[in-house]
Image (tube, coloured by chain):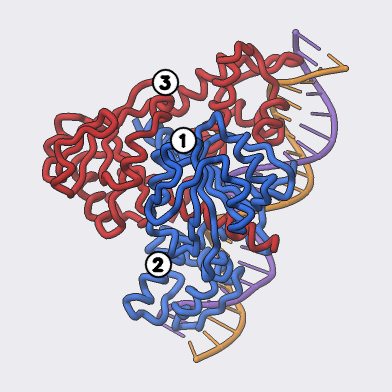
Chain colours: A red, B blue, C orange, D purple
Amino acid sequence: MAYGYRIGSLPLTTVQRLPSYLRVVREMRRLGREVVSSARLGELLGLEAVQVRKDFGFIGISGMPKMGYQVEELVLAIEHCLNWNQVRDAVLVGVGHLGMALLGYEGFKAHGLDICAAFDIDPSLAGLVVHDTPVWHMDRLEPELRSLGARMAILTVSPDAAQEVALRLARAGIEGIWNFTGCPLDLPPGVIVQDQDIAIGLAVLSAKLSSRA
Amino acid sequence: MAYGYRIGSLPLTTVQRLPSYLRVVREMRRLGREVVSSARLGELLGLEAVQVRKDFGFIGISGMPKMGYQVEELVLAIEHCLNWNQVRDAVLVGVGHLGMALLGYEGFKAHGLDICAAFDIDPSLAGLVVHDTPVWHMDRLEPELRSLGARMAILTVSPDAAQEVALRLARAGIEGIWNFTGCPLDLPPGVIVQDQDIAIGLAVLSAKLSSRA
DNA sequence: GAATGTGAAATTTTTCACAGCA
DNA sequence: TGCTGTGAAAAATTTCACATTC
């Protein structure tokens, strides 16, 4: 039951830090800053400077001694690693409160994600356009997926339906599922599942608060 | 810039796995199962059996050789570790799409969380009751917090407002902030911040998909 | 001097190997 | 035999120490 410590040649922990680096260096670019030191980035993000340097080494970026790293180069390199420099189509399944919120989330553009269609079991939602995204009934899932060619799906259905819908997505050729249901999914190998379990963050915060009291 | 590897006596990684254990053992209890082996739990959650046993050792649970672990005992022990067996009040600040979705999320009850009030800068939201939760204008933040006595806040404001609002919460006596804004917060020591950055999950999934193509 | 870059050490986490028990 | 429990080993990650470069 091997673990996934690495993604390609990058340590998993490095990949997990890339979004926060990207946010900061994009903001610096916006402000016209051209270089930044690992110490400054570390200070802003609560990391050791040497860890920042190691991470940048992994993604193939060299800095200039005494100067720091070039902001523009960092932005491009991180976007490239994450494939966030080009638009990728995704579908969203389950237009409840959370699905609706994700459809309205402006930030996905900055991450290269375009939700091109949504699906729900509720017939009264079919035909609506929510935040510029058309909503289809679940009956239309397979045919629409065929014509859209999206590789990624965002799963925001209820826990009861999670496994069944995920299997339909996998059979329809979806390669990656971003799983917000909190249920572990059992899918054929080759389909990549990324669990986004909100309860983990709450658990860590709860435990920290408890241990202080 | 010391790291937080442990929460109290528990490894951070163990705490992060507790919610998924809890979900499964609660479901087993519902189905009337009285015992479960570490191997079965590992199979369901994609973990090594020995890791499950180590985790249960950390939270002080012993199993019975040949039998397994008592489901009821596991439920109670995990709930106790996370303090999810008693109701804790929280406030939510920022009633946009995401805040609205969290207000409507039924699952918080199962995690002992009760959102007793929400706040937003938009005057037209003030006075509304969203999913049983009253919404106040931001002007009422400090006085309402004083009377409510909530220790925890859920931060779902826009990135621009994140730091400023977080500081107000800290000054008003909030001890833990669950930060959904994606911005790093700089707060006085003693305030616990738990970042819930959705972009991390997307980054991992994006990188995995890229490295397969 | 002020920054990067990197091998080595320290720390943490996972996995192995196997003793012990019902 | 089937499962737990645990010390030891392995692997991964972070941190230290310091050489290097502009």
Q: Chain of mark 3?
A: A
Instruction: Classify the position of the C terminus of chain A by image quarter.
Output: bottom right
Whole-percent x, y for residue B77 in the image: 54, 73
Whole-percent x, y for residue A89 in the image: 29, 29
The relative height of residue B183 versus residue B86 in the rendered view (above or below) is above
| Whether residue B196 is visible | no
Amino acid tagged 2: Val
Q: Chain of mark 1?
A: B
Q: Which residue is mark 2?
A: B24
Local secondary structure at mark 3: loop
Left or right for A185, reference B156? left
Looking at the rendered structure, whether the residues under marks 3 and 1 are on a common chain is answered as no
Instruction: Classify the position of the N terminus of chain A by image quarter.
Output: bottom left
Residue positioned 45% across, 35% down in the render: B203
Q: Quadrant of residue A14?
A: top right
Q: Are marks 2 and 3 in contact (CB under 8 Å)?
A: no
Crowding near pointer 1: few (<14 within 10 Å), some, many (20+)? few
Residue positioned 67% across, 19% down in the render: A36
- Of residue A82 and residue A117, the one placed in the foreground of this image is A117
Crowding near pointer 2: few (<14 within 10 Å), some, many (20+)? some
